Amino acid sequence: MYYDHKTLLYLDGKFVKASDASTDLYSQTLHYGYGVFEGIRAYKTENGTSIFKAKEHYERLKNSAELINIPFNYNVDELVQVTYDLLEKNNLSDAYVRPLVFCDPNMSLTQPNNVSLMICAWEWGAYLGDQQLRLSDDSYCGRHQRSVKIEAKVCGHYVNSILATTEAKRNGFDEALVLDSDGFLAEGPGANFFFEEDGVLYTPQLGNILPGITRATVLELAENLGIKVKKGLFRPEELYTADSAFYCGTAAEVIGIESVNEYQFPKKWNDSLGKKLQDEYSKLVRTPEKKLSTAT
């Protein structure tokens, strides 16, 4: 699914065949989830392949590593160029890119002395599909800011996401909606959350959610469209008077939500603010020349 005998990936400064690449089974990342990663998308545009917000993603990768004391001795601009080279070598335009910083062998619970960097890419459609989602608010709460660095994209954090999604699917839903440890709306297992009521968008504030790059883009687009957005703490029951909702993320892009638990949002997706933002986002990622104002 992700590679074949011709696929190349980038590993510690070299392009190697994915089928020949290897790692040490004593890696601290493999045993403890102590590593950081990113999810990046490339799109085919009129001017060729364009990686959407590549620099922002690699800056976040660097920040994630530094937040959890993982060495990061890489140049962001060079990593962006390497990624373009990787896509070209694999003849990919519309693709998903996965950089991963993983640690050397270490069975102790101490920070590593050395790390490796891998970048791979593959063709991948919208992660959550193109149909509206049926969500359940999950029994698993999200990560707590006093126990982990929530703003870091850490490998081990996503065990929480896997458990939440698995539970939702076992209960007959498409995806989970995760609450924070105080019972407020937080995010999806791999996406940020917005809902609409009376022409206003609402989204959980930063603090107990990953500060998504797609979320920031959606906020910029909303400002450009004159859509009012309120950020704050919201209880799940507030959704039961909402008109519509959506998830957004690099892998998911912008995807509408049909329902949460038994409540079905009354507004048709095509008439929602989310649909307007979905359309604008789709145009933006395929138009590299267009620049947005800096988000606040």
Image (cartoon, grey):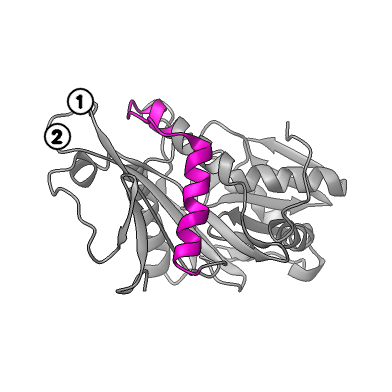
- Using the image as rendered, state which of residue 222 and residue 228 is in the foreground: 222
- Left or right of residue 290, residue 261 in this image: left
Q: Label 1 belongs to which residue? A: 110
- Using the image as rendered, state which of residue 20 and residue 62 is in the foreground: 20
- The numbered disc on residue 189 is none
Q: Quadrant of residue 18?
A: bottom left
Q: Label 2 belongs to which residue? A: 106
Q: Quadrant of residue 278?
A: bottom right
Q: Crowding near pointer 1: few (<14 within 10 Å), some, many (20+)?
A: few
Q: Which residues are magenta?
A: 64-91
Q: Quadrant of the C terminus?
A: top right
Q: Looking at the magenta stretch, what is its main secondary structure?
A: helix
Q: Position of residue 131 (x, y in %)?
A: 61, 74
Q: State the CA–CA distance, disc 2 to disc 1.
A: 8 Å
- Using the image as rendered, state which of residue 141 and residue 116 is in the foreground: 116
- Give yes or no for contact between labels 2 and 1 (Cβ–Cβ under 8 Å): yes
Q: In what element is the residue under mark 1?
A: loop
**Three-letter residue code for mark 2:** Asn
